[in-house]
Image (tube, coloured by chain):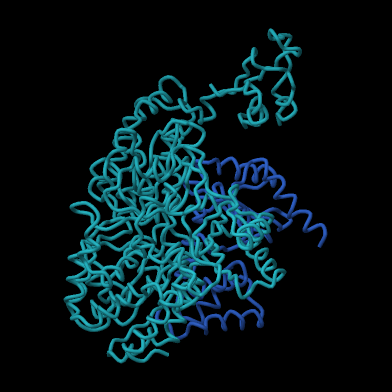
Chain colours: A cyan, B blue
Amino acid sequence: MIKTVEELRARIASAEVELKSKYDGSDSKRWLTLCGGTGCIASGALGVQEQFEALIKEYNAGDKVGIRTVGCFGLCSQGPFVRIYPEDTLYVLVKPEDCREIFEKDILGGQIVERLLYKDPKTGKPIAKQDEIGFYAKQRKVALHGVGIIDPTVFDEALGCGAFQGLLRALSMERADVVKEVLDSGLRGRGGGGFPTGRKWSFAMNGDGQKYVVCNGDEGDPGAFMDRSVLEDNPLQVIEGMMIAGYAIGATQGYFYVRAEYPRAVAHLKSAIAMAEEEGLLGDNILGTGFSFHAHVRLGAGAFVCGEETALLNSIEGQRGMPRPRPPFPAVKGLWGRPTVVNNVETLSCVPYILREGAAKFASCGTERSKGTKVFALGGKVNNVGLVEVPMGTTLRELVFDIGGGIPGGKKFKAIQTGGPSGGCLTEKDLDAEIDFDNLVARGSMMGSGGAIVMDEDNCMVEVAKFYMEFICDESCGKCSPCRIGTKRILEYLTRICDGNATMDDLAQLKELASTIKSNSLCALGQTAANPVLSTLAQFEDEYIAHIVDKKCPAHVCKNLMQYVIDKDKCIGCGLCLKNCPVNAISRTDYVAPGHKLASMVIDQNKCIKCGMCMASCAKTKAIEKK
Amino acid sequence: MAHLNEAATEQIKAICDRYKDEKTPLMMILSDIQREYGYIPLEVQEVVSDKTGISVAEIYGVVTFYSFFSLVPNGKYVIGCCLGTACYVKGAQQVIDKFSEILGIKAGETTSDGLFTIDALRCIGACALAPAVTINGKIYPRVTVKDVEKIVAEYKSKEAEA
């Protein structure tokens, strides 16, 4: 139990030495540092850990070699990872059967196992150090501070990595000065809206009585997982951010609202709260300063709309997660009718940095109106899939091609979808745009919570719009009719277009309906519900027209508008496709192509169900294509 | 309507008591019941209503609003197919279609033997492993249409052995 500020400072000092020793070799040990992120665990990291534990036992090397599991390394597509300190050698895609080689050759023999190093996708050159990999080189960690460095289940590791230093500074300041510091930093809400965090706090700091801080961890945008990562891998940082917010606005109670889909994040968050309570950093009269704060966890139950702040408050209050009309804003009348600040996980995660390092340092990177960094979940058709944190002002091109390593299989970049279902698509012409809140909006998309899904030439944009509309239709809470009925009608239009049954009249009506929904819905979910259509229409109207007028899907995705065709001169007549066809739509012709021995195959288009099994089975000869 | 037997009623009441000091405990009570029993039928909602004073209509409204709460029991194995954007652009729809085809049920339904439920999930945050499938919490990364048959067979043979 830490009772005073002095005691905490002393504890921090010793924790810093302890953590440092696991990285710089000052404890004379080699440390096998494993990534324990959800991605790596699903890819088999636990088996790797078991192997290493057995090897340490076998060689009786416990005094020379240690194992630590830390948070997500970010480059999830290359996991499981093993990083060896103090040399800082990174091994990627490690399987349990690779462990002996790493252990015997590197740990015992001091030689790098080259075949398990990361290979640069462009040059094929192996890279041993994480920071030299393109994916990491342009990153800067603020919200993800400590993620991938500390073991989130060990309190002192967080302490050794800066935890509670921001709170210490805040507690030595006047409340209004803390708010001013956050205002000066230029921090804007990372959940999507981009509202200045300090302004939100200043609304709530006036007024007396019970107030609340609510952390919005209902990360619902499909394709975004930064909040999960912070909650899993450095939960104390988010708790500290919430406490600073509580101190600043005069709240003593905080609620985390986290998706039930994230069981590991919930477990780590709960254990971090318990550790902080045990150490006296949550509770009454913290460190003898007179500041009291209690943190609670509430689980979501699978409703996207609960990411909207007023719907979230209703959900905590045990009701259907339907948005409330604003005003009154939560800062005036929020949880149980009391002034409430609702901040997103990533936003709160930036707050300790601002107090620890100062507003000026936070604001030293970024653009004129968007300061600091932003975390993106880079996914879809890109080589390096994972979580990245970059300074605001980084260009989309850097994000997709330098950090993301480009598009796999030499395919052509088509669009990057940002902002989740409420966002939009950005194309080739936007690639050199600097990422910031206002710039993305000006180009017809938005920052959103930071999902960034890359699409290539094989993605049909009408079908993508339909996918998002299915999602929104499903998740519309049903309170207001423009969203409830309008999204359903939009989906019907899109389905007709994808099926090849639409007319140009439909397209005109679709446009009108989309703008009606935009201007008439109650909450942000409804107001942005039509964005997938509006944005793809703005960028790819020719694809819509191709579906409607030419009855063709240019990306060959929409089943009614494409065919699988066998090139009779390429077909070697092996019969693999015939064997794999589930509906017997393939038969042999009499035609033997020049140079081949067997007659070629043909697909009966009336029988074909377009499952694609034939094309998959012809991967070697490549005689089947989509038309 | 059927009523719960006494023992079951007591168990539900005990769950309600866990949160008796909370201002608005309904979501927490329902989450616990869903997690521990797998579904929240009307009989159970009645008991929660008696115990908390919240009307059955309101409880029913909440249960049917959130996709995690279910009025009917799920299968022994819940096949959660992620249909988040990252999974979708990498072919998740074909994967879930294949599960539907093999098991003969649509998303949200349970097989008649009570073994499998197919659930369409909205992003489980495993985007680097797209398309991802979870079965009772275990994540299957980069699932292809070809893998689907193997996965189903794995669980069927597990059942045959047991």
Q: Relative to A625, say whether B105 is above or below.
A: below
Q: Quadrant of residue A48?
A: bottom right
Q: Confirm whether residue A233 shows in the render.
A: yes
The spot of residue A349 in percent (x, y) is: 34, 67
Residue at image x 60%, y 20%?
A565
Q: Nearer the viewer, residue B146 or B83?
A: B146
Question: Which residue occupies the foreground of this view, B112 or A498?
Answer: A498
Q: Is B98 above or below relative to A602?
A: below
Is residue B108 at all visible to an observer of this figure? no
Residue A467 x/y as whole percent: 46, 42
Most extreme residue toward the right is B161
Residue A194 location in percent, x, y? Answer: 26, 57
Q: Is residue A450 left or right of residue A91?
A: left
Q: Position of residue A188 (x, y in %)?
A: 25, 60
Residue depicted at 36% across the width and 73% down the height: A162
Horizontal side of A606 relative to A532 (left or right) equals right
- Residue located at (33% from left, 88% from top): A286
| Image quadrant in which the N terminus of chain A is located | bottom left
Task: Examine the image and state in which quarter residue A242 appears.
Answer: bottom left
User: In the picture provided, is A56 more to the left or to the right than A366?
Assistant: right
**The one of A291 and A480 positioned closer to us in this rendering:** A291
